[in-house]
Image (cartoon, rainbow, N blue to C red):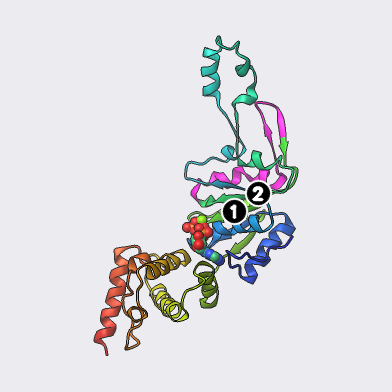
C-alpha cells in the first residue's frame, strides 16, 4: 500500500516519500507547515486513498491526553444511582455503561487498519504530547476502572499536525517521522489550483498567481496568504467575473489586486502593501 496522491490532493514527491516512510517505520507522521498548506487534508486523503477509515481528534487548548483514551463519567453514575430505585439499578452496577471511549480506544480494537489524525497538537498544553508517549509507542493502555488492557489489533497510521505554536518535547519527537510541508512553488500551486478549478483560463491563472506571489513575497507581512487563501480569492475572482485586465497593470508595476481582503487579513498588511504600490508609482 503506497500513497501516491489523489485526484483531489496534490502531493509532492517528498511528501509522498514521508507518508510512506512513516507507514514503513510504523511511526506517526508529524506534519508541520504554514496554516492552509494541506496538513489536515493530507490525513483525510491518505486514509481515503488507502481505503482506511479515518478517526479524527481535533485538539483544543483544554484537551487532555486522557480524553483520547477514555473518560469515566462518575457524575452520571452518581445521578443514576440516586434514581436507581426505578429500574433496580441494573445500569449502575455495570461500570462499562459509564466509560466513554476516546478516539484511541475506538481505533485500537478495529479489525481493519485505521488512520488516526491528531490535529493541531500544538494547541494543547505542554504535558499533552508527553502524556501520550506510551500509547503511541506501545499502542496500548490500561483502564484502571475496569482493569482492562486495551491493545491495538493493528497499529493505526497516525498523522499529527502542528502549526508550531509550541515546541514539542524531544521524547515525543523521537517517536515520530517528521515532514515540513514547504509552501508550494508556482508549478505545484498551478497543479493544486487545477484540482479545485479545472476549467480556469490559463491567462487568468497566470495573472492571479503573479499577483498572489507579489503579495506573498512582500517583506514584513504579518500574515502571509497561503494556499487556502489563494483558492478563496480565485473563487471570488471567478464568481465576480473579474476581467483579466483588472489583474494586470499596464506598466508592469505592482497594483493592489481586487478583493485583496481574501489574501491579506489585517490592516497593517493592507496598508504596507498600499504603501509599496504608492512608492512604486511615484518612483518612476
Ligand atoms: N496539496 C493540496 N492539494 C489540494 N488542495 C490543497 C492542497 N493544499 C491545500 N489545499 C487546499 O487548502 C485547504 C486548506 O487545507 P488544510 O485545511 O488541510 O490546511 P491545514 O494545513 O490543515 O491548515 P491549518 O493549519 O490552518 O489547519 C484545503 O481545503 C484544500 O482545499
Ligand atoms: Mg488543519
Q: 156 left or right of 206?
A: right
Quarter of the view holding residue 96: top right
Most foreground residue, 109 or 284: 109
Residue where numbered disc 1 is placed: 160
Q: Could you tell me which residue is drawn at 60 percent across and 42 percent down?
A: 131
The structure residue drawn at horizontal position 42% and vertical position 64%, both measured from the top left corner, is 232
Mark 2 packing: few (<14 Cα in 10 Å), some, or many (20+)?
some
The residue under label 2 is 53
Identify the element where label 1 is drawn.
strand
The C terminus: image quadrant: bottom left
Place of residue 231 in the rendered image (x, y in percent of width and height, measured from the top left) = 45, 66
Neighbours of disc 1 within 10 Å: few (<14), some (14-19), many (20+): many
- Residue 8 vs 138, above or below: the answer is below
Alpha carbons under labels 2 and 1: distance apart = 16 Å
Locate residue 33, reporting x and y percent.
Answer: 52, 63
Q: Who comes first in sequence, dot 2 or dot 1?
A: 2
Q: Using the rendered image of the protein, determine whether residue 53 is visible from the camera's viewpoint.
A: yes
Residue stretch in magenta: 123-149
Amino acid at each position: 500500500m503506497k500513497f501516491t496522491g489523489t485526484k483531489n490532493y496534490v502531493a509532492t514527491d517528498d511528501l509522498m516519500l514521508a507518508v510512506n516512510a512513516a507507514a514503513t517505520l510504523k511511526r506517526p507522521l508529524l506534519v508541520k507547515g504554514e496554516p492552509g498548506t494541506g496538513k489536515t487534508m493530507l490525513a483525510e486523503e491518505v486514509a481515503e486513498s488507502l481505503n482506511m477509515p479515518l478517526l479524527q481528534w481535533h485538539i483544543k487548548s483544554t484537551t487532555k491526553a486522557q480524553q483520547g483514551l477514555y473518560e469515566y463519567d462518575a457524575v452520571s453514575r452518581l445521578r443514576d444511582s440516586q434514581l436507581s430505585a426505578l429500574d433496580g439499578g441494573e445500569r449502575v452496577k455495570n461500570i462499562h455503561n459509564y466509560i466513554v471511549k476516546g478516539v484511541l480506544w475506538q481505533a485500537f480494537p478495529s479489525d481493519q487498519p485505521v488512520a488516526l489524525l491528531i490535529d493541531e497538537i500544538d494547541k494543547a498544553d505542554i504535558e499533552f504530547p508527553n502524556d501520550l508517549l506510551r500509547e503511541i509507542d506501545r499502542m496500548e493502555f490500561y483502564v484502571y476502572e475496569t482493569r482492562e488492557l486495551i491493545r491495538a489489533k493493528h497499529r493505526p497510521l497516525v498523522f499529527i499536525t502542528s502549526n508550531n505554536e509550541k515546541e514539542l518535547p524531544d521524547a515525543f519527537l523521537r517517536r515520530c517521522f517528521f515532514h515540513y510541508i514547504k509552501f508550494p512553488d508556482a508549478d505545484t500551486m498551478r497543479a493544486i489550483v487545477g484540482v479545485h478549478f479545472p476549467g480556469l483560463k490559463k491567462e487568468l491563472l497566470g495573472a492571479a498567481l503573479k499577483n498572489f506571489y507579489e503579495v506573498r513575497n512582500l517583506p514584513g507581512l504579518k500574515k502571509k496568504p497561503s494556499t487556502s487563501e489563494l483558492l478563496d480569492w480565485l473563487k471570488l475572482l471567478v464568481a465576480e467575473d473579474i476581467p483579466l485586465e483588472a489583474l494586470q497593470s499596464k506598466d508592469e508595476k505592482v497594483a493592489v489586486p481586487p478583493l485583496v481582503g481574501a489574501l491579506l487579513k489585517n490592516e497593517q498588511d493592507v496598508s504596507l502593501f498600499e504603501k509599496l504600490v504608492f512608492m512604486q508609482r511615484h518612483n518612476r
